[in-house]
Amino acid sequence: MPIVIFFLIHWYLSLFFQSFFHHRYAAHHHFRMSRRWEKIFFIISFITQGSSYISPYSYGIMHRLHHMHTDTENDPHSPANHPGFWRMMLETRNNYFSIHSGKTTVKEKIKKDLPQWKAFDAIAHSWITRITWMILYTLFYISFATAWWQFLLLPLTIIMGTLQGAVVNWWAHKFGYTNYFVNNTSKNILPVDLFFWGEAYHNNHHQYPGRPNNAHRWFEFDTGYFVLKLMHKTGIIRLNSYGKE
Ligand SMILES: [Zn+2]
Ligand SMILES: [Zn+2]
């Protein structure tokens, strides 16, 4: 079963770094880190997201726009505006590339303090790099697949980061429970989040986007925040609110 194990490890690592670096650090600044660690996490995000790597800088802009304009026509990804999972995913992709290429005009204050490494992103974000990843994934599947159906996971491996972003952003604005009455469709998609590193508590996150711990009720547990606390203790990051949560 090496393919299934690989797929699961890839799922958790890719999503962890999207949550940790793109979402909680770039977009929300829940914690600080040195420039050196920032560069290391650019590289680790690239390795774990592979062909679906997106720029933390452009993601940060897109995500801040999502919080500012949730469910309105200016929301870059809202199932209320773009019904249907695949349609919303495509729309998100188009909006993302429009931001990344500079076609979308973005106010200076939205870009404030976003981590940026232009030289690295120029390589990591290029089509040549993405195609190289796709070839490597395909060779890995050919070498280690033990049954034909495992190849059904290959397209999901290729689009992993995009798929994960879309699953959270679509599902968490469609189905689930709410702890807070907010003026948007955000929901907590799972009471016990074993799959999304705490990103499942999206209604909590929309209510308190500045809070690093997304778990607000006794049965909720934010595994991503748990890792953040460990990283804080080891000195890799500095949580702004450590000891206050
Ligand atoms: Zn949302
Ligand atoms: Zn957010």
Image: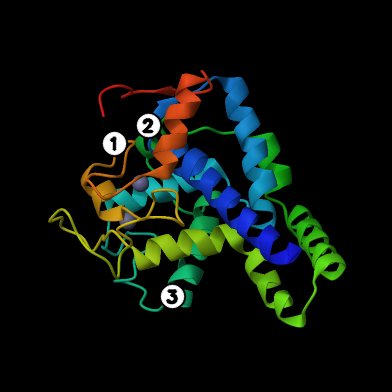
Secondary element under disc 3, as helix, strand or loop, is: helix
The CA span between labels 1 and 2 is 7 Å
The CA span between labels 3 and 1 is 28 Å
Left or right of residue 134: residue 110: left
**Residue carrying label 1:** 210
Taking depth in this image into account, of 7 and 14 the one nearest to the observer is 7
Residue type at mark 3 is Phe
The CA span between labels 3 and 2 is 29 Å
Q: Residue at x 29, y 21 (%)?
A: 243
CB under 8 Å between discs 1 and 2? yes
Mark 2: give few (<14), some (14-19) or many (20+) Cα within 10 Å: many
Residue 229 position, x and y percent, is 42, 29
**Residue carrying label 2:** 30
- First reached walking from the N terminus: tag 1 or tag 2: 2
Q: Residue at x 23, y 44 (%)?
A: 216
Mark 1: give few (<14), some (14-19) or many (20+) Cα within 10 Å: some
Q: In the rendered view, would you say 176 is above or below 66? A: below
Residue 101 visible in the current orientation: no
Left or right of residue 241: residue 194: right
**Residue carrying label 3:** 85
Question: What's the colour scheme?
Answer: rainbow
Residue type at mark 2 is His
Q: Residue at x 49, y 48 (%)?
A: 59
Q: Quadrant of the N terminus?
A: bottom right
Left or right of residue 234: residue 245: left
Taking depth in this image into account, of 133 and 91 the one nearest to the observer is 133
Residue 125 position, x and y percent, is 67, 49
- First reached walking from the N terminus: tag 3 or tag 2: 2
Q: Farthest left residue?
A: 181
- First reached walking from the N terminus: tag 3 or tag 1: 3
